């Protein structure tokens, strides 16, 4: 009986340890490093990096990503990121080009009182070059909603569009626990080369990439 109790305790220890490992390998990108009391936080480059992941934009100019500060009426309750370019495409990858699962993201309308419901199309490319896609429509009420992704697994990249009505995003939940011991990152193309062409073909059909920044003259603008 004593041996059985010790065995059960050992299994429990292993289970807890395993859960701990998986939890440690899960990532939630919350953009808290961008939190500010100022009006806006502009990212001077066309990429943003956090927790081993990189966000890039199809608009390669400066100030492409931005985050509203607490003094801005468009602050949706926590620091978030927005692609500050109309008709642009945002792409998310691991910095080491490894695989990941996209679990969920929070989305809000970009501007308080903006008209219409943002429609966001997502396109994921897996390591085996198969693809997955979905569409999410916000409810039109300013504030965050959570989108949970199905089958967005074993990804090397996921992209989505920033078209009017516009949106901002937060709490990007990702999981790498199934892939961290795999050595396959070297074969993944750069986001600006072959992968970029595939993404632009999938999400960019019918879009004119104007690269137009949100205008300073608008009271609710980012910059």
Image (spheres, rainbow, N blue to C red):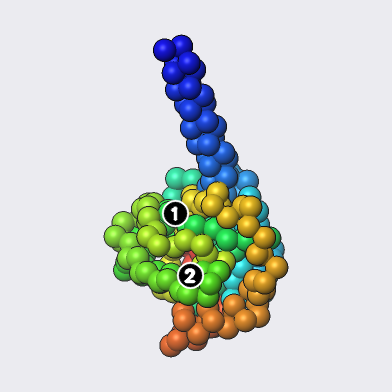
SS of the residue under disc 2: strand
Residue 217 is situated, as x and y percent measured from the top left of the image, at 53, 69
The numbered disc on residue 19 is none
Q: Is residue 178 visible?
A: yes
Real-space Cα distance between discs 2 and 1? 12 Å
Q: Which residue is mark 2?
A: 124
Q: Look at the picture and state if 140 lies above or below 8.
A: below
Q: Are marks 2 and 1 in contact (CB under 8 Å)?
A: no
**Residue at the location (66% across, 64% down)?**
185
Residue 77 is situated, as x and y percent measured from the top left of the image, at 45, 45
Quadrant including the N terminus: top left
Q: Is residue 111 left or right of residue 115?
A: right
Q: Look at the picture and state if 98 lies above or below 22.
A: below
Badge 1 crowding class, 10 Å Cα cut-off, few under 14, some 14 to 19, many 20 or more, is some
Residue 186 is situated, as x and y percent measured from the top left of the image, at 70, 68
Q: Is residue 92 left or right of residue 147?
A: right
**Residue at the location (52% across, 78% down)?**
199
**Residue at the location (66% across, 68% down)?**
46
Residue 29 is situated, as x and y percent measured from the top left of the image, at 55, 50
Q: Look at the picture and state if 142 lies above or below 204.
A: above
Q: Which residue is mark 1?
A: 103
Quarter of the image for residue 43 reads bottom right
Q: Is residue 70 visible?
A: no
Q: In the orientation shown, which residue stands out farthest toward the left?
A: 139
Q: In the orientation shown, which residue stands out farthest toward the top?
A: 2
Q: Earlier in the sequence, mark 2 or mark 1?
A: 1
**Residue at the location (65% across, 75% down)?**
189
């Amino acid at each position: 009986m004593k041996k059985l109790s010790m065995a059960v305790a050992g299994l429990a220890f292993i289970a807890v340890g395993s859960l701990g490992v998986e939890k440690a390998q899960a990532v939630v990108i919350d953009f808290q490093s961008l939190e500010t009391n100022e009006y806006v936080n502009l990212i001077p480059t066309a990429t943003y990096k956090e927790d081993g992941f990189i966000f890039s934009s199809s608009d390669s100019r400066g100030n492409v990503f931005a985050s509203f500060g607490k003094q801005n009426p468009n602050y949706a309750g926590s620091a978030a990121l927005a692609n500050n370019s109309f008709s642009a495409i945002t792409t998310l990858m691991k910095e080491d080009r490894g695989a990941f699962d996209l679990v969920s993201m929070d989305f809000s309308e970009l501007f308080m009182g903006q008209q219409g419901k943002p429609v966001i199309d997502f396109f994921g490319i897996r390591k085996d070059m198969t693809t997955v896609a979905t569409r999410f429509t916000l409810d039109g009420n300013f504030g965050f909603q959570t989108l949970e992704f199905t089958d967005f697994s074993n990804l090397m990249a996921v992209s989505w569009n920033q078209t009017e009505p516009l949106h901002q995003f937060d709490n990007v939940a990702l999981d790498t626990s199934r892939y961290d011991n795999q050595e396959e990152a070297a074969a993944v193309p750069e986001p600006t080369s072959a992968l970029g062409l595939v993404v632009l073909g999938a999400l960019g059909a019918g879009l004119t990439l104007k690269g137009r920044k949100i205008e300073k003259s608008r009271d609710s603008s980012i910059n």
